Image (tube, grey):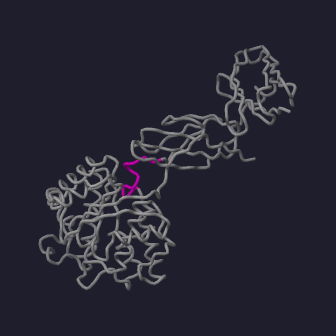
Amino acid sequence: MKEKILILALIFSISAFAQKKILFLGNSYTAVNNLPNLLYQMALADGETIIFDSYTPGGYTLQQHSNDVTALAKINSQAWDVVVLQEQSQLPSFPPFQVITDVLPFAKKLDSLIHVNNPCTQTVFYMTWGRKYGDQGNCANYPPLCTYAGMQERLRESYLLMADENHARVSPVGIAFQNSIAADTTLDLYVSDFSHPSVAGSYLAACTFYASIFKRNPVGNTFLSGLSGTTAAFLQNIAAHTVLDSLSTWKIGVYEPNADFSFTQNGLTASFTSENVYSSSHSWSFGSTLYNPDFTFPTAGDFSITHIACDACRCDSLTKTIHINSIGIEENVLDQFLKIYPNPSNEYVMIALLTNTISHSLKLNLISMDGKQLYNSVLPENSNLKIDLRKFKKGNYLMNFEDVSGRICTKKITLE
């Protein structure tokens, strides 16, 4: 029989879909086809609301944004949930030494200004795409730019470096472009300049941002931006697989609270390990608030475990069903020498240790069938123990007995 532990008072306001305020700072790659509005429409079709603003002068760099009065005023205009930073389309693809001097300091400066305004704002770096035929204007000076693939790889490296340096996320739009091109070369994501996005390209960008910011699958979204249902569905799937199959690659959740956990089992006791260090508080469905708690289950079986991890700004929640194996207790040592009577009972139970073979006391825990510990005591060696059950509701309970070597014996009692 599968046993489940009830969620104990874990009522948190955790919603990936709460209304988000998003600011876009970039240039024409953001402005063409009004990417912020495409994201807004996609969220609206899914029953959510985005409040957004943008500042996207043509050709603008992060350095220009970091010194621009309008850009800085927009950063400081309210407590944004997300600020998207998009560098000029070529700069991050240049040689690493040039990116170190011309890009990284200004990414860091903007990220710092964003967090001075609101420490809880998430910075998201908008990884753009390689030009359709590479950057031919700079090809002679830096050969990786001679092809689309070479330019895209440099963009990928630089944007991931920006995210790492600033503990931020990446929206991997450029990789979504790459995956779309690999899957269908007939769908053109560019306009005639081989640089700026077509409607399909901007729609793919919006789907990628939707998955990156909300960790939400865009597949099935009813906003199509004028595309055919088949084309929109294809692009939705590309974005979903690009982002959601590789969240840690794009630093999504890496520098934020992450409720993922693992566990090891020793007998009926499970030792849980939190998989993320960027959390300051924890809540587990069995009542613990420790980072890495232990919990002894009443019996073997399947249990639903919820873990909520939070920092000062946000929380993440995860529920897993885990299986606790039968531990093969040496019942001939404990079980055969323990007697509980009367059982069923309507008032008291007596617990007797029938031999002096066990030359030590036993820990006793009375546990409800939903995993709550109701009573604990010690059964001294060579003695009896009487327990008053009148304060408990009628029903079935478990009694766990544990000796000094960690062996456990579980017995079921019934209160009528």
Q: Is residue 313 left or right of residue 86?
A: right
Where is residue 77 drawn, in percent x and y?
A: 27, 55
* Left or right position of 212 against 97: right
Up the image or down, 269 lies above or below 123; here it is above
Q: Magenta span has 412?
A: no
Q: Is residue 156 left or right of residue 252?
A: left
Q: Quadrant of residue 6?
A: top right
Place of residue 13 in the rendered image (x, y in percent of width and height, measured from the top left) = 50, 48
Helix, strand or loop for the magenta stretch, by majority: loop
Q: Is residue 63 above or below residue 133?
A: above
Q: Is residue 314 above or below residue 38?
A: above
Q: Which stretch is magenta?
A: 248-258
Quarter of the image where one finds residue 347: top right
Drawn side of residue 364 relative to residue 37, left or right: right
Q: Position of residue 50 (x, y in %)?
A: 40, 63
The vertical placement of 317 against 61, above or below, is: above
Residue 255 is one of the magenta-drawn residues: yes
Tell me which residue sits at (71%, 32%) in the image.
Answer: 367
Image spot of residue 185 (x, y percent): 37, 83
**Quadrant holding the C terminus:** top right
